[in-house]
Image: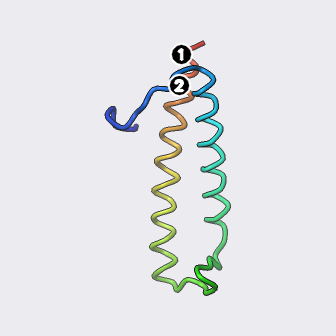
Amino acid sequence: MIPEQEWIEPASKEDGEARALRLLEDIQSIEVQLGDRNRMFENRRLGDHEYHQWRAKANRARHQKTLEYRRLRLWLKRAK
């Protein structure tokens, strides 16, 4: 879960739903990028080492966004 100090409760149910939608879009975008083995940066293909570093970073970002999304969905469920 997201540490308590990093969690910012939504101001309203509508705010929470908008945040959840943005998070879901971010997660889906990361997943699409992770599917590209020929990842390019500044018009050149990343080398194996660079690619694996980038992939690990993208996976961490996806994981954190997924945790926040789950916590937000739980908050929304309780807010009904």
Disc 1 residue crowd, few under 14, some 14–19, many 20+, Cα 10 Å: few
Q: Which residue in the protein does label 2 denote?
A: 74
| Res 7 label | none
Q: How many numbered discs?
A: 2
Above-or-below relation of 73 to 36: above
Above-or-below relation of 77 to 73: above
Q: Position of residue 6 (x, y in %)?
A: 36, 38
Element under disc 1: helix
Relative to 21, 52 lies left or right: left
Q: Residue at x 48, y 75 (%)?
A: 52
Above-or-below relation of 79 to 16: above
Q: Position of residue 69 (x, y in %)?
A: 54, 37
Marks 1 and 2: in contact by CB < 8 Å? yes
Element under disc 2: helix
Front-most of 53 and 40? 40
Q: Residue at x 48, y 40 (%)?
A: 67
Front-most of 5 and 11? 11
Q: Residue at x 63, y 23 (%)?
A: 14
Q: Position of residue 44 (x, y in %)?
A: 61, 87
Disc 2 residue crowd, few under 14, some 14–19, many 20+, Cα 10 Å: few
- CA gap between label 2 and label 1 equals 6 Å
| Res 78 label | 1
**Image color mode:** rainbow
- Position of the N terminus by quadrant: top left
Q: Residue at x 59, y 35 (%)?
A: 19
Front-most of 11 and 3? 11
- Position of the C terminus by quadrant: top right
For badge 2, the amino acid type reads: Leu
For badge 1, the amino acid type reads: Arg
Q: Position of residue 23 (x, y in %)?
A: 59, 43
